Image: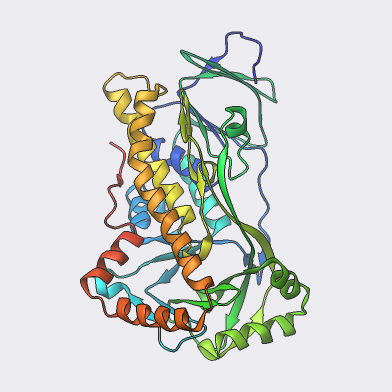
Amino acid sequence: MQTQDRKGEAVDLLIVGAGMVGLMLAAALRHTGLHIVLVERLAGQARLSLGRDCRVSAIVQGNVRILQRLGVWKYLEQDAGMMTSMRIWDGQEQGGMRFDASEIDEETLGYLLENRVLLDGLRQSLQESVDVELLCPESVQQVLWRRDGVQVQLAGGRVLETPLIVGADGANSWLRGQADIDVFQRDYGQQGIVANVSPRFSHQNTAFQRFLSTGPLAVLPMPDNMCSIVWSCTTAESERLLALSDAAFMDDLNEHLGGLCGGIVEVGQRAAFPLKAQLARHIVRHRLALIGDAAHSIHPLAGLGVNLGLRDAMVLAQEIVDARKFEEDWGELAVLNRYMKQRMPDVLLTMASMEALHQTFQAQLPAWVKLRGLGMKMMGNAGVVKQLLMKNTTGINLPVPHTIE
């Protein structure tokens, strides 16, 4: 969509969307001297469950290190729930797998953070810089794509000119649509029910995930011995569970968890969201880069979606800084292709892994269930292979910059 071509205010980078990933990109660049503008349509309101945001993010250890080195973690650590181990088991088989941070010589596999806490911490970090503007509520009204830059008309009247515009505006990205970029999409026909719950006994900083015939049920450790649940199930089952009273829902939950942590004794307000995976056909165009859910979204069964987005932000930030250092135009496709080529192996491998896990645990044929149980036991005793899987999943082994230089 085009706007009237008139001289606008020059900025070095315009980020559309100030969610976790858009804020991360700005936070990574906040001390570089670049003039950065973030535009966010609405400041979302957290939906509370037992007094905490019912939407949480599992930040893997590799990304925790990035947040620490960027100086953002200090705003987050007091509200983070440590995850030192993870237990996974199949609803049809005994046994399962256990992953402990000590197996890879780490103190923790990662931390659980309420989404509102992560957003607030990233916003606080931006206050350290006078070069970052966060405009909210504000929206982009029109975009004019030109060879030498992008001109943007904001709803509030400002006209901005920038060498690069970044789409960080979520799975239903408005900016992606303006660039006529389609997506490959996979609808799982499922919903994810989220809520906060209290167990009778300590969760001992352990995350639990049980694969049921209707989908995975995750119980994630939060501070103050609270847990966050993510229960992925068919849309019909989700609607049934949402319609239950708190007591009846808790009974269903305890039945499926089998007395985990002495049973769940309190459950907060529930919410649900549809489960889809998608990948933009192009994550870069001339003077446009997509990051986070605007570029890709995955099934939440391993909680890795936001971590992909945070890594997008770090790689793009480094490419922008490198281009500036060598007097390159960071909106040129040659620069943006470097970002794309670095990110696609991680994105595609993670998406393929999540799809394979989903298909593996959806199948309920007796022979396949037995084979699946055997495979889990073998992986649990796989030694070096298991350690490599853990290091990749926690982001420790991935070639992502931990600081922007």
Where's residue 329, x and y in %? 37, 19
Image quadrant containing the N terminus: top right
- Quadrant location of residue 99? bottom left
Protein image colouring: rainbow
Seen from the viewer's position, the closer of residues 364 and 390 is: 364
Up/down of 182 relative to 371, above or below: above
Up/down of 29 relative to 257, above or below: above
Where's residue 97, x and y in %? 37, 79
Q: Is residue 18 visible?
A: no
Rendered residue at 59%/84% (across/down): 256
Indicate left or right for 401 with 119 as reference. Answer: left
- Quadrant location of residue 269? bottom right
Seen from the viewer's position, the closer of residues 228 and 351 is: 351
Rendered residue at 68%/63% (across/down): 272
Instruction: Please give the count of numbered marks on the rendered protein.
Output: 0
Indicate left or right for 142 with 360 as reference. Answer: right
Q: Residue furthest left?
A: 384
Up/down of 256 relative to 270, above or below: below
Q: Residue furthest top?
A: 6
Rendered residue at 47%/70% (across/down): 360
Seen from the viewer's position, the closer of residues 72 and 44 is: 44
Q: Is residue 296 visible?
A: yes
Where's residue 338, x and y in %? 33, 32
Where's residue 33, x and y in %? 38, 27
Indicate left or right for 163 with 159 as reference. Answer: left
Rendered residue at 34%/37% (across/down): 341
Image quadrant containing the C terminus: top left
Seen from the viewer's position, the closer of residues 73 and 84 is: 84
